[in-house]
Image (cartoon, rainbow, N blue to C red):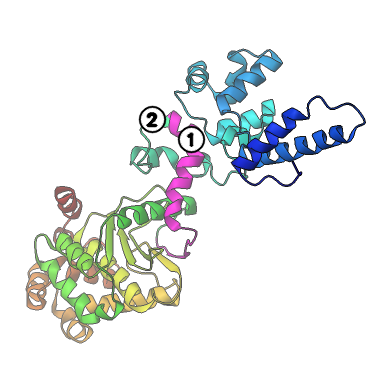
């Protein structure tokens, strides 16, 4: 048989048979050289066709234990408690990335074996539970695919956080913050909140969004819903029908957040609201402020706006925030009418009458008067305290 590169099963079987005939070749003869050549050809074919797989991770751990004379207790420093070691070795608990890093560093088990992926190396960890309000995120269901305890979640934090932030699809927007509250902002908490909003928005199944349909007249129609008892819920439904995702998600600690707007990776606008201040005046101003951002700014690049609107948009914010604030104010209350009549609105009865004339909630008028007077003690009964959150709780 003429030696050549083996390309298929038939040639492989023929080469094996020929190799067997050469097994009795005498040293130093041409047959011995042919034997060595066919052995190499067969070995190369087998390597390409029947590659030896990586050992199973638990088997690799047990092999290293035997090599080093280790007990299960010796593994606790790499895996955790005695029960976790038992569960891992009995294949009832998967290895976490944290465990894999420890076993790789401590027992010198190749990363590709522990990861069950040939040629893969361990990347530097991108996330740690210590960098986030992890306990609060766990309690609020941020890790929807995980059913274990908080301690288990911390063990698998790197994987859970990777899954959460996958909602950005590698295109996290530039964040613009407008704040009135004091305190150090936790940007990682803000990032986590935004990622969860993206997840929820992706599940809403909305029609396509057409920016040309978002007109000032449409936003005024949204404001008109404020005069109805279920106005906030109806506003959500109207926006969703226009392809704008709307998500209510409580703020995380140290985010000082009332509302935000940004685009999904597919380009859909999303409004997220926290109901941090459960009042009608805050709800309507925040909603219209975010709609103003979508109308004015969101089409111009990958940017996200995060707003603390409790006392209106601060004049120290960016020009974009000031533009959104001014447009929101005019859409909530027509400037010409407001400037003509606001000085005559001095009582709760006057506020209600003026609001009825415009067909909007008295809370919007009361909130505007409080902001302009910089007196947040007036007209408290008209603001709709503790009325918004229960509307969405009842609907959801």
Q: Give coordinates of residue 298: x percent, y percent.
A: 38, 73
As for residue 164 lying within the magenta part, the answer is yes
Region in magenta: 151-180
Residue in the picture at 19% in, 61% down: 280
How many numbered dots are placed on residues in this image?
A: 2
Question: Would you place residue 195 above or below residue 76 in this image?
Answer: below
Secondary structure of the residue carrying numbered label 2: loop
Distance, label 1 to label 2, CA atoms, is: 10 Å
Residue 365: say if magenta: no
Q: Residue at x 25, y 63 (%)?
A: 206
Taking the spot 48% from the left edge, 29% from the top edge, the residue there is: 94
Q: Please tell me in which quadrant of the rendered image residue 358 appears.
A: bottom left
Q: Is residue 374 left or right of residue 190?
A: left
Q: Position of residue 275 (x, y in %)?
A: 27, 55
Viewer-proximal residue among 37 and 290: 37
Residue position for label 1 = 156
- Spot occupied by residue 134 in the image (x, y as percentages of width and height): 44, 40
Tag 1 and tag 2, C-beta contact below 8 Å:
yes
- Residue 259 occupies which quadrant of the picture? bottom left
Labelled disc at residue 249: none
Give the number of the disc on residue 148.
2
């Amino acid at each position: 048989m003429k030696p050549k590169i083996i390309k298929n099963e038939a040639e492989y079987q023929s080469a094996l048979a020929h190799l067997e005939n050469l097994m009795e070749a005498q040293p130093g003869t041409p047959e011995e050289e042919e034997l060595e050549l066919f052995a190499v050809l067969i070995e190369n074919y087998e390597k390409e066709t029947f590659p030896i797989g990586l050992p199973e991770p638990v088997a690799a751990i047990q092999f290293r234990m035997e090599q080093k004379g280790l007990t299960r207790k010796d593994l606790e420093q790499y895996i955790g408690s005695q029960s976790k070691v038992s569960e891992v070795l009995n294949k009832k608990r998967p290895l976490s990335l944290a465990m894999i890093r420890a076993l790789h560093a401590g027992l010198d088990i190749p990363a590709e074996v522990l990861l069950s992926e040939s040629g893969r190396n361990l990347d530097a960890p991108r996330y740690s539970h210590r960098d986030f309000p992890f306990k609060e995120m766990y309690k609020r269901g941020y890790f929807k695919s995980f059913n274990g305890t908080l301690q288990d979640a911390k063990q698998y934090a790197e994987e859970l956080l990777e899954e959460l932030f996958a909602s950005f699809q590698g295109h996290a927007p530039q964040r613009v913050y407008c704040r009135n509250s004091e305190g150090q902002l936790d940007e990682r908490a803000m990032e986590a909140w935004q990622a969860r909003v993206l997840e929820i928005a992706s599940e809403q199944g909305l029609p396509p969004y057409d920016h040309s349909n978002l007109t000032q007249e449409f936003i005024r129609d949204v404001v008109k819903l404020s005069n109805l008892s279920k106005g906030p819920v109806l506003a959500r439904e109207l926006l969703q029908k226009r392809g704008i995702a709307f998500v209510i998600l409580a703020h995380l600690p140290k985010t000082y957040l009332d509302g935000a707007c940004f685009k999904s990776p597919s380009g859909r606008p999303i409004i997220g609201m926290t109901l941090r201040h459960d009042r009608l005046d805050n709800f309507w101003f925040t909603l219209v402020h975010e709609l103003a951002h979508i109308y004015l700014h969101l089409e111009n690049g990958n940017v996200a706006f995060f707003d603390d609107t409790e006392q209106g948009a601060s004049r120290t914010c960016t020009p974009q925030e000031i533009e959104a604030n001014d447009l929101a104010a005019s859409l909530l209350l027509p400037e010409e009418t407001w400037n003509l009549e606001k000085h005559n609105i001095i009582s709760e009865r006057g506020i209600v009458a003026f609001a009825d004339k415009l067909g909007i909630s008295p809370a919007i008028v009361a909130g505007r008067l409080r902001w302009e007077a910089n007196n947040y003690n007036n007209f408290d009964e008209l603001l709709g305290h503790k009325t918004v959150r229960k509307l969405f709780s009842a609907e959801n």
